[in-house]
Image: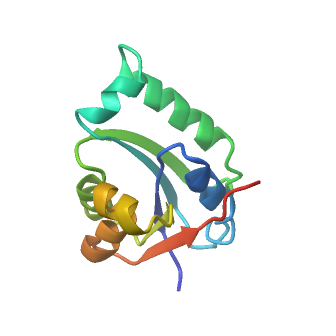
Amino acid sequence: MQFKRILFPVDFSEHAERSLSRSSQFLSGAELEEVHLLYVLHTPTDYSTWSEDPTGDVQRRLDAVGGSIDLPPQVQLKSTVMEGHPSSQICKYAASHKCDLIVMATHGRTGLSHMMLGSTAEQVVRHAPCPVLTLRVAPTN
């Protein structure tokens, strides 16, 4: 299966960064045209972790992440910051940009923390307009 547009939701966690680096086999396909990095500011709770300009701060971090990805010259990199509920915005973005694949990390929470926090990856898998590849990346010790 060939992918032209791949979406990587990013939350700046170790899991997300490691899943992006482990996805190099998808980033070298001959058909690949665009790689999208997306961060969703989870309103209103996410604003407390950023400065007075959360969108600008996040965009700068996304640009840094994008700069660390080794892409073939024909592939365009797009990075976007959105506001709202992460799983909803990820699905909306994928649909509006006609993404062929969403690649995202899963934290692998279980039990009470899964019930309390929910699972963004689980919700994206349920509602995405395209295939979703979830990567369970073991933490480094």
Q: Position of residue 107 (x, y in %)?
A: 50, 61
Q: Position of residue 100 (x, y in %)?
A: 41, 72
Foreground residue among 120 and 32: 120
Q: Residue furthest front?
A: 112
Q: Position of residue 16 (x, y in %)?
A: 56, 54
Q: Position of residue 119 (x, y in %)?
A: 35, 63
x 41%, y 23%: residue:
50
On screen, 69 above or below 23?
above
Q: How is the image coloured?
A: rainbow
Residue 21 occupies quadrant = bottom right
Position of 38 with respect to 118 (left or right) is: right
x 52%, y 37%: residue:
62
On screen, 115 above or below 31?
above
Q: Residue furthest top?
A: 52
x 35%, y 70%: residue:
122
Foreground residue among 104 and 140: 140
Position of 129 with respect to 31 (left or right) is: left
On screen, 132 above or below 27?
below
Position of 37 with respect to 98 (left or right) is: right
What is the tally of numbered marks visible in this picture? 0
x 43%, y 68%: residue:
110
On screen, 137 above or below 41?
below
| Quadrant the C terminus occupies | bottom right
Residue 39 occupies quadrant = top left
Q: Residue furthest right?
A: 141
